[in-house]
Amino acid sequence: MSLASYIGCFVEIPITPEKEQLEALFFVDDCFSGEEEKESVKKHQFTTPYIYEVSSHRGIEITNYMNPETREKSKKKLIALCEMMNHYLEKGDYFELFSCWVGDERDEREGELTLKLVEINIDNLEIPEKTYLRIYK
């Protein structure tokens, strides 16, 4: 099984060109999921019309119980994702983030967080799998 991270937003986001995906910290495109998984996460988790997988060959998960190197990489991915989304969001807009094992998209959330984009304290943030985040600009 693979841990996938999905974002939902009100604007279309360009898919990362394939030639850039190998070098990217994360990219916007299907890696583990397909249309069925994205439709499921849209129906069961998100309120936004545009759904994307953001990947780096492992989803974004941040807990104190995971491998420290993997946790730090997830922190960097989340920071880069927020920087990217900052360019697409208008003041007051938000995007949604949900990470789960492929096939668990319709499972009940195990946590919810609402964060302000410019106030995220990455060092104090815990995002276990199946945690829904709404991140406002």
Image: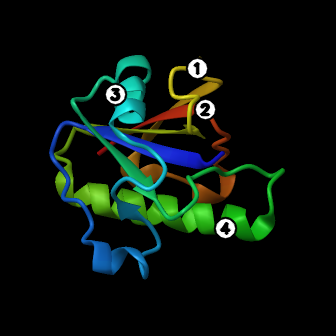
Of the residues under marks 4 and 3, which one precedes in the sequence?
3
The type of residue carrying mark 1 is: Asp
Q: Residues within 10 Å of mark 4 (few under 14, many from 20)?
A: some
Residue 110: which quarter of the image? top right
Q: Is residue 28 left or right of residue 25?
A: left
Provide the residue designation for mark 3.
Answer: 39
Measured in 3D between alpha carbons, the distance from the residue under mark 1 to the one under mark 3, in whole angstroms, is 13 Å
Of the residues under marks 3 and 2, which one precedes in the sequence?
3
Q: Quadrant of the N terminus?
A: top right
Of the residues under marks 2 and 1, which one precedes in the sequence?
1
Of the residues under marks 4 and 1, which one precedes in the sequence?
4
- Disc number lying in front (4 or 1): 1
Helix, strand or loop at mark 3: helix
The type of residue carrying mark 4 is: Glu
Provide the residue designation for mark 4.
Answer: 72
Provide the residue designation for mark 2.
Answer: 130
Measured in 3D between alpha carbons, the distance from the residue under mark 4 to the one under mark 2, in whole angstroms, is 19 Å
Q: Which residue does the image show at 34% across and 27% down from the upper left?
A: 39
Please say if the residues under marks 2 and 1 sit with CB atoms less than 8 Å apart.
yes
Measured in 3D between alpha carbons, the distance from the residue under mark 4 to the one under mark 3, in whole angstroms, is 30 Å
Provide the residue designation for mark 1.
Answer: 107
Of the residues under marks 4 and 2, which one precedes in the sequence?
4
**Measured from the top left, where is residue 49 in percent x and y?**
21, 30
The type of residue carrying mark 3 is: Glu
- Disc number lying in front (4 or 2): 2
Q: Which residue does the image show at 63% across and 43% down from the upper left?
A: 127
